[in-house]
Image: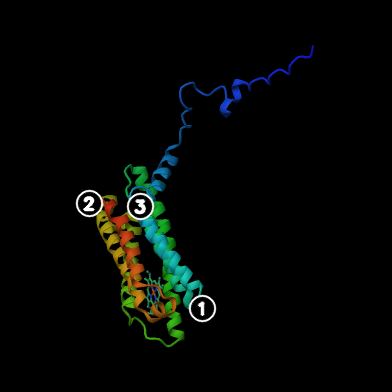
C-alpha cells in the first residue's frame, strides 16, 4: 500500500518568524547599550529634525535648491560661485544653530559646541570665498561696490559674522583671553542673542537680492518665494529659542 507523502516537518522553532531561540518570550530583546558619546551624538542629531526644526529644514533646503537650480540653468561664470557658496553656507549656519537647540548635559554642550564651530568654520570659509568672488567679479566689470540694498545688508552681515565668530572662538577655545572660563561663560548669552540677530540679517540679505536686476529679470527668483522660505525658517527656529538662556 502506497503511503501518502508525509507533510513536510514544520520549520524548527528556532526559525519561526526569523527569531532565534534566545528571543525572550515576552517582547523583543532590549537594544544593546550605547556609549555616552553615541547618546550625545544621537541627541544632537535628533535636534536637527525634531519639533519645529523640520520646518526650518524645509525652508532652508527650498532656498538652496532654488538658488542652485536657477544659477546652474545659466552659463557658468565667475559670478555663479557667489550665490552657490553663500546658499550652502547659509544652510550650514542653520544646521549649526538647530544642532544646539537645545543641549542639556555638560557633555552635550561640549560636543555640541565643537560640532557647531566646525560647521560654522566651514560656512565662513564658503561665504567669505563668495565675498571674494563677487568683489573680484565687480572689479573685473568696473562695477560700483556696495550700492544696492543687497550689497549693503550683505556687507553688514559679513562684518557681524566676523565679529560673532571671533567672540565664539574666544569664549570657547581661548577663555583666558577674557580672564577665564567664568567670564567666557558670561558672554555666551550675548553670543546667542547676536546669533539670532545675524540670522535675521542673513534672511534680509537673501530677500533683498531678489531686487537686483540679474536675479529679478534673468534668474527670476521671486521676492515672495525667498520671503516665504525665510518665514518658514523662522517658524522652525524661533519656537525653539530658550528665553531663559537669553536673559
Ligand atoms: C546670504 C548670503 C549673502 C551675502 C552675505 C551676500 C553679500 C553680497 C555682497 C556684500 C555683495 C556686494 C559686493 C560688492 O559690492 O563688491 C553682493 C553682491 C551680489 N550678490 Fe550677494 N550675498 C549673499 C547671497 C547671495 C545670493 C544667494 C545671491 C543670488 C541668488 C546673490 C547675488 C548677488 C548679486 C547678483 C550681486 C551683485 C549685485 C549687487 O551688488 O547687489 N547673493 N552680495
Q: Indicate the secondary structure of the residue bearing disc 1.
A: loop
Q: Residue at x 45, y 86 (%)?
A: 141
Kindly indicate whether the residue at mark 1 contacts the one at mark 3 (C-beta within 8 angstroms).
no
Q: Quadrant of residue 90?
A: bottom left
Disc 3 target residue: 53
From what the image shows, is residue 201 above or below residue 98? below
Front residue of this view, candidates 16 and 163: 16
44 to the left or right of 22: left
Which numbered tag is attached to residue 77? Answer: 1
Q: Are marks 2 and 1 in contact (CB under 8 Å)?
A: no
Between disc 2 and disc 1, whose residue precedes? 1
| Separation (CA) of disc 3 from disc 1 | 35 Å
Task: Look at the image and tell me whether residue 139 can be seen.
Answer: yes
The outermost residue toward the front is 1
Q: Nearer the viewer, residue 36 or 176?
A: 36
Q: CA distance from mark 2 to mark 1?
A: 45 Å
Q: Which mark is residue 115?
A: none
Q: For the point 42% across and 88% down, which residue is it?
A: 142
Q: Which residue is mark 2?
A: 243
Q: In the orientation shown, which residue stands out farthest toward the right?
A: 1
**In this view, 212 is above or below 160:** below
Q: CA distance from mark 3 to mark 2?
A: 17 Å
Amino acid at each position: 500500500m502506497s503511503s501518502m507523502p508525509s507533510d513536510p516537518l514544520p520549520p524548527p522553532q528556532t526559525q519561526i518568524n526569523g527569531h532565534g531561540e534566545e528571543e525572550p518570550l515576552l517582547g523583543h530583546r532590549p537594544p544593546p547599550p550605547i556609549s555616552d558619546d553615541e547618546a550625545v551624538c544621537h541627541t544632537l542629531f535628533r535636534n536637527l529634525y525634531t519639533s519645529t526644526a523640520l520646518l526650518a529644514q524645509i525652508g532652508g533646503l527650498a532656498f538652496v535648491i532654488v538658488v542652485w537650480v536657477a544659477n546652474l540653468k545659466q552659463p557658468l561664470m565667475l559670478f555663479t560661485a557667489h550665490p552657490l557658496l553663500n546658499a550652502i553656507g547659509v544652510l550650514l549656519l542653520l544646521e549649526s544653530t538647530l544642532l544646539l537647540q537645545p543641549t542639556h548635559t555638560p557633555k552635550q554642550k561640549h560636543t555640541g559646541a565643537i560640532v557647531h564651530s566646525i560647521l560654522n568654520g566651514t560656512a565662513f570659509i564658503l561665504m567669505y570665498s563668495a565675498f571674494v568672488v563677487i568683489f573680484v567679479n565687480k572689479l573685473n566689470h568696473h562695477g560700483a561696490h556696495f550700492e544696492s540694498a543687497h550689497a549693503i545688508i550683505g556687507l553688514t552681515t559679513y562684518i557681524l559674522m566676523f565679529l560673532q565668530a571671533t567672540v565664539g572662538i574666544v569664549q570657547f577655545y581661548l577663555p583666558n583671553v577674557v580672564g577665564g572660563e567664568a567670564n567666557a561663560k558670561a558672554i555666551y548669552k550675548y553670543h546667542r542673542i547676536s546669533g539670532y540677530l545675524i540670522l535675521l540679517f542673513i534672511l534680509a540679505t537673501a530677500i533683498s537680492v531678489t531686487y537686483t536686476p540679474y536675479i529679478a529679470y534673468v534668474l527670476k527668483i521671486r521676492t515672495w518665494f525667498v520671503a516665504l522660505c525665510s518665514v518658514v525658517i523662522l517658524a522652525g527656529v524661533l519656537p525653539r529659542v530658550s528665553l531663559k538662556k537669553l536673559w
